[in-house]
């Protein structure tokens, strides 16, 4: 297998806080890699480093053989790396279709408008927004906005999709639907790196899991391996007697 | 205390449903808090702990279910009306008045009429529990360390003369040595007969402190039982790690 994404010994500090420390990870082609960790572990910062919102202080990020370290987000998006954000910000006055078209226009392929619109229409249907393409995005329900965020990213026809908490705020049946959509995306050959708090979902979706704690990798492996890892259990469940050397609290 | 008063739980939550706008977070949580005991509500990030507390204390309205406090249905009451009845929240992230002194923050806690009558007595108790607050009573709260702020937030809660003190995220953001100090104080408070509902992400810590525990995941109940037993149950790992 070859890697779609290689993060090599990356570090990022904010003032006195080491948000990410010497982190290395790979996303293989066609893989769903889950990124988990307690609050403040550095998960969103890792996403921000990968898609160029922040430049790392140290280390290297390689996407499909191209060094993208420090490149701006729009250029990284053009290479085929798209992101669905935790806090959705649709263009509220534009229709669902137009929102997706914007995604298609600034994605991997430099599509003419009509083709971008066709691609957008296809993606909107795929995420279950087919009957709402003319609705202003601002009128969608929370679940609808989550789907739209995913559709916008997917319209860019990415090789790698970063999913940040796409299940947050969904009810159980919406969660199940979204899981099926994500599985469908992977089936078409898109690699996925996902952050998720709904643990049951991320454990069942992911081929592999990377566990972050205090900005560093705590463990990686199959979902069942990491769930049985004593260090992971301590990071999640805490310790009864906090002591000076029990670790820092983020 | 009569037998009746001892047997009925101070707080009973039945089938609580709560959320924000079109997002429902809590899907049928029930729990009881016995008088004079420490009960804990546990669950991973995003499980719905804080939303449960908000609905119980009145900062959001429950969408379904019932909240019974001291034998009275308080489901629809606003937060200040609940505080006036002694249902008191120490909020996550302390939420102190940074430009006020320690003493002024404490006075704010005694704002409601019932608490105002007992202000001097309550302040004495707070200063006994937290001598550090007494030493610094003229200092502004905003200049305090995280641990001192948490002490002050608990102190302000005590100033409201609570029948039930609810503490959201006791240890969040605090260094382990500071957590240890605050845990000691809670133990003292508990030994004095206070009724406490503790929400805490550090499961092992909460189980070690409390008498009875409820675990929730994705806004629904997972299990409950005496804290010592709950710690041994395999469902715990599943609730936190999904496997």
Image: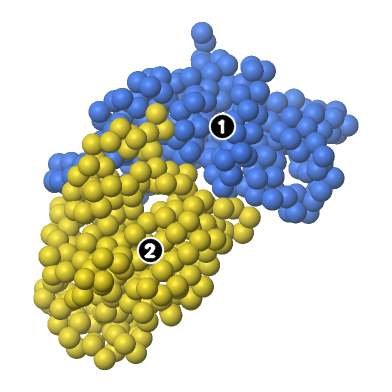
Q: Nearer the viewer, residue B156 or A92?
A: B156
Distance in Å between CA atoms under marks 2 and 1: 43 Å
Which of the two residues, A13 or B131, is positioned nearer the viewer here? Answer: B131
Q: State the residue position of label 2.
A: B12
Q: Residues within 10 Å of mark 2 (few under 14, many from 20)?
A: many
Q: What is the chain identity of the residue bearing mark 1?
A: A
Residue in the picture at 51% in, 66% down: B60
Image quadrant for the N terminus of chain B? bottom left
x, y percent for residue A80: 64, 25
Q: Chain B, which colour?
A: yellow
Question: Height in image: A62 above or below A234?
Answer: above
Q: Secondary structure at mark 1?
A: strand
Residue with the mark numbered 1:
A162
Q: Residue at x 37, y 33 (%)?
A: B238
Residue B206: percent from the left, percent from the top?
Answer: 24, 50
Circle 2 marks a residue in which chain? Answer: B
Q: Is residue A19 left or right of residue A168?
A: left
Chain identifier, blue in the render: A
Instruction: Please indicate, yes or no, whether residue A65 appears anywhere in the rendered image.
Output: no
B14 shown above or below B238: below
**Structural crowding at the residue carrying mark 1, measured as other residues with C-alpha within 10 Å and reported as few (<14), some (14–19) or many (≥20):** many
Judge depth for marks 2 and 1 and give the one in front.
2
């Amino acid at each position: 297998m070859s890697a779609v994404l290689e993060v090599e010994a990356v570090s990022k500090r904010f003032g006195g806080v080491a948000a990410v420390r010497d982190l290395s990870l790979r996303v293989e082609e066609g893989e769903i890699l889950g990124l988990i960790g307690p609050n403040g572990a550095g998960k969103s910062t890792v996403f921000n480093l990968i898609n160029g919102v922040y430049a790392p202080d140290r280390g290297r990020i390689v996407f499909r053989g191209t060094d993208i370290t420090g490149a701006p987000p729009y250029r990284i998006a053009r290479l085929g790396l798209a992101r669905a954000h935790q806090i959705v910000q649709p263009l509220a006055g534009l229709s669902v279709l137009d929102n997706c078209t914007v995604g298609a226009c600034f994605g991997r392929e430099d599509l003419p408008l009509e083709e971008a619109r066709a691609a957008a229409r296809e993606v909107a249907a795929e995420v279950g927004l087919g009957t709402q393409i003319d609705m202003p995005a601002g009128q969608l329900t929370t679940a609808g906005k989550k789907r739209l965020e995913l559709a916008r990213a997917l319209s860019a026809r990415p090789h790698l999709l970063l999913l940040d908490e796409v299940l947050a705020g969904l009810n159980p049946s919406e969660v199940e639907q979204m899981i099926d959509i994500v599985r469908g995306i992977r089936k078409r050959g898109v690699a996925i790196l996902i952050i998720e708090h709904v643990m049951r979902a991320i454990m069942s979706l992911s081929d592999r899991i990377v566990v972050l704690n205090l900005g560093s990798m705590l463990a990686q492996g199959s979902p069942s391996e990491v769930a049985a890892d004593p260090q992971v259990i301590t990071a999640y469940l805490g310790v009864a007697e906090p002591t000076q050397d029990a670790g820092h609290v983020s | 205390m009569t037998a009746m008063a001892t047997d009925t739980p101070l707080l009973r939550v039945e089938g609580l449903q709560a959320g924000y706008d079109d997002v429902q977070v809590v899907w049928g949580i029930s729990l009881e808090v016995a008088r004079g005991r420490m009960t804990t509500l546990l669950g991973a990030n995003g499980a719905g702990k804080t939303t449960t507390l908000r609905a119980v204390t009145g900062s959001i309205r429950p969408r379904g279910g019932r909240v019974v406090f001291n034998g009275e249905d308080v489901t629809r009451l606003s937060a200040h009306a609940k505080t006036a009845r002694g249902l008191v929240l120490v909020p996550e992230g302390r939420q102190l008045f940074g430009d006020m002194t320690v003493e002024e923050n404490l006075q704010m806690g005694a704002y409601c009429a019932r608490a105002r009558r007992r202000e001097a007595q309550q302040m004495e108790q707070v200063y006994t529990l937290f001598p550090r607050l007494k030493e610094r009573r003229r200092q502004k709260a905003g200049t305090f360390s995280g641990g001192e702020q948490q002490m002050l937030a608990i102190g302000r809660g005590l100033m409201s003369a609570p029948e039930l003190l609810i503490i959201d995220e006791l240890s969040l953001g605090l260094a382990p040595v500071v957590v240890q100090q605050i845990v000691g104080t809670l133990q003292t408070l508990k030994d004095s007969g206070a009724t406490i509902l503790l929400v805490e992400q550090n499961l092992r810590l909460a189980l070690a402190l409390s008498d009875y525990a409820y675990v929730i995941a994705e806004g629904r109940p997972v299990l409950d039982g005496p804290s010592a037993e709950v710690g041994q149950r395999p469902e715990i790992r599943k609730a936190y790690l999904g496997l």
